[in-house]
């Protein structure tokens, strides 16, 4: 809206608003908010500065839970989700203590360790051959009709 009015100052505010079906009170409230932001926006800017300072003091390690705790110790009463939102908007993130699931990468130029057990590539089958159930140790008995047990 502002770009349109800046680009065509001869049009005037009221005709442009009428054409766009925007109430003039909305436009003037929006312009007033640019000059004097509301209390929440001012407080968010102040909190973002404190959050940036705490994050920087921690060496970029602290995430939102710890920053929320530090703010609480300093006597700043603010919600956890507000801290999360402000950190997200500021592009701040803590370092997760969880390890990544890296695995050892083999050096392709390194010599392989010798096979001291002289193993071959043929391995014992893990399943019994076809036709065998692997339960040869059990005795096949008929069930007793009285006890319904084997």
Image (cartoon, helix red, strand yellow):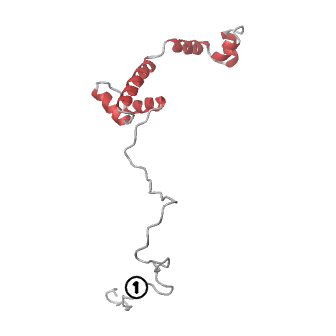
Quarter-of-image position of residue 65: top left
Quarter holding residue 42: top left
Q: Nearer the viewer, residue 5 or 29?
A: 5
Location of residue 75 (image quadrant): top left
Q: Quadrant where the N terminus lies?
A: top right
Q: Give the residue at x 38% y 30%.
A: 55
- Find numbered disc 1 in the image and state the secondary structure of the residue it sits on: loop
Residue located at (63% from left, 16% from top):
2
Task: Kindly identify the residue that appears in the image at 43 percent across and 50 percent down.
Answer: 100
16 in relation to 137, above or below: above
Q: Name above or below for residue 123 compared with residue 58.
A: below
Q: Position of residue 85 (x, y in %)?
A: 44, 31
> Which quadrant is home to the C terminus?
bottom left
Q: Is residue 99 above or below residue 144?
A: above
- In the image, residue 116 sits, relative to residue 62, either above or below, namely below
Residue bearing the label numbered 1: 135
Would you call the spot at circle 1 few (<14 residues within 10 Å), some (14-19), or many (20 or more)? few
Residue 121 in percent (x, y) is at 50, 76
Q: Position of residue 49 (x, y in %)?
A: 41, 23
């Amino acid at each position: 809206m502002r770009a349109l009015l800046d680009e065509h100052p001869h049009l005037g505010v009221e005709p442009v608003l009428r054409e766009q079906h925007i109430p003039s009170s909305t436009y003037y409230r929006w312009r007033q908010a640019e000059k004097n932001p509301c209390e929440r926006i001012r407080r968010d800017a102040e909190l973002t500065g404190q959050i940036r300072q705490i994050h920087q003091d921690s060496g970029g390690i602290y995430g939102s839970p710890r920053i929320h705790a530090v703010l609480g110790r300093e006597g700043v009463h603010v919600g956890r989700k507000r801290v999360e939102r402000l950190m997200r908007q500021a592009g701040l993130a803590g370092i997760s203590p969880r390890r990544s699931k890296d695995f050892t990468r083999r050096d392709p130029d390194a010599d392989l360790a010798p096979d001291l057990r002289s193993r071959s590539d043929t391995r014992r089958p893990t399943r019994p051959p076809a036709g065998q159930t692997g339960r040869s140790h059990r005795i096949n008995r008929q069930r007793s009709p009285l006890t319904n047990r084997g």
